[in-house]
Image: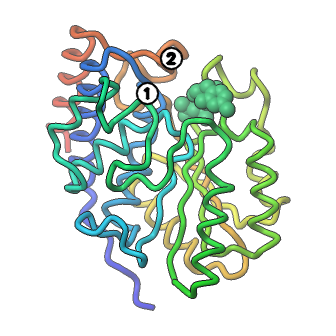
Amino acid sequence: MAKKAHPDIKELKKKAVQIRKDILTMLEKAASGHTGGSLSLVEIMIVLYYYKVKHDPKKPDWPGRDKVILSKGHGCPTLYAILADLGYFPRKELWTLRKLGSRLQGHPQIGLPGVEISSGSLGQGLSIANGMALANRMDRIKTKTYCIMGDGETNEGQVWEAAMTASHYKLDNVCGIIDFNKMQIDGFCCDVKGLEPYAKKWQDFGWHTIEVDGHDLGCLMDALDETDKIKDKPQVIIAHTVKGKGISFVENQVKWHGIAPKKEELEKALKELDAQLKTL
Ligand SMILES: Cc1ncc(C[n+]2csc(CCOP(=O)(O)OP(=O)(O)O)c2C)c(N)n1
């Protein structure tokens, strides 16, 4: 199959800045939510939605679509910002995040166009991705299911049950992506419950394993392309990221796991993002 041309990296970088602005603005208006783990996800989700995934915002239920499961559901501001940008729902809904009656809750819920599963209880997404992939295989529909997990999330035992299931059933239509930002709710993963040797764990569970800089758009595109060549094995991309990426005073700060920026912090962050835009 001919290789799909990569989109212009500069345009995608501009998109990343815009999505970060939307995430922070949504969170400030909501006055609660998960800032650090939303910002670390941005490039991963941009490459999926603006390059890799087959999807149609006008037909969110199209059976031929690839599926993106956001298993680390607390990162949903990133998903919402991208889905709105793509036209899955009106952009003005972004500013209703976490409000009573809004379709945009603090964790994704089925019913919002583009959301494949309700998530938030960590550890469950990969099992659901396996089920979808098995169903697609039985129906002979050639699509892929991408499952985005947090590194802390993979402390959950269910992830490893699902990892065994995927390799047992040779689910080459499942691709896991780990937002490997080395942090979780209570601190650094290595202090809470160490994951290393992480890549080896996935390999030992029978997965084709790729490690990549999770903020390098070109490398992410190459990694996703590589997964398509793998037969009879699920694949996982361990994307090395920075929690809070893009905002100097948020990066790698445990306290920014589950808080939103206040008005002055938002203003400061937006200035930083505008400055980044000028350097592109
Ligand atoms: C089953 C379950 N236990 C606990 C939580 C509370 N919780 C929310 S986010 C989080 C940390 C997850 O860490 P990680 O997956 O690394 O996310 P990131 O650091 O990327 O935000 C926890 C424990 C949850 N959502 N689900």
Quadrant for the C terminus, please: top left
Colouring of the image: rainbow
Task: Mark yes or no: residue 248 visible.
Answer: yes
Image position of 65 with respect to 154: above or below: below
Helix or strand or loop: what does disc 2 sit on?
Answer: loop
Q: In this view, does 175 lie to the left or right of 58?
A: right
* Residue 211 image point, x, y percent: 62, 55
State ligand 1's quadrant. top right
In front here: 94 or 279?
Answer: 94
Image position of 178 with respect to 94: above or below: below
* Residue 59 image point, x, y percent: 28, 69
Q: Distance between the residues labelled 1 and 2?
A: 8 Å
In front here: 181 or 104?
Answer: 104
- Circle 1/circle 2 CB separation < 8 Å: yes
Q: Report the label total.
A: 2
**Label of residue 91 in the image:** none
| Residue found 55% across the figure and 77% down from its top | 228
Q: In this view, does 146 lie to the left or right of 267?
A: right
Image position of 223 with respect to 97: above or below: below
* Residue 149 image point, x, y percent: 59, 45
Residue under numbered circle 2: 253
Three-letter amino acid code at disc 1? Answer: Gly
| Residue found 23% across the figure and 32% down from its top | 21
Residue under numbered circle 1: 244
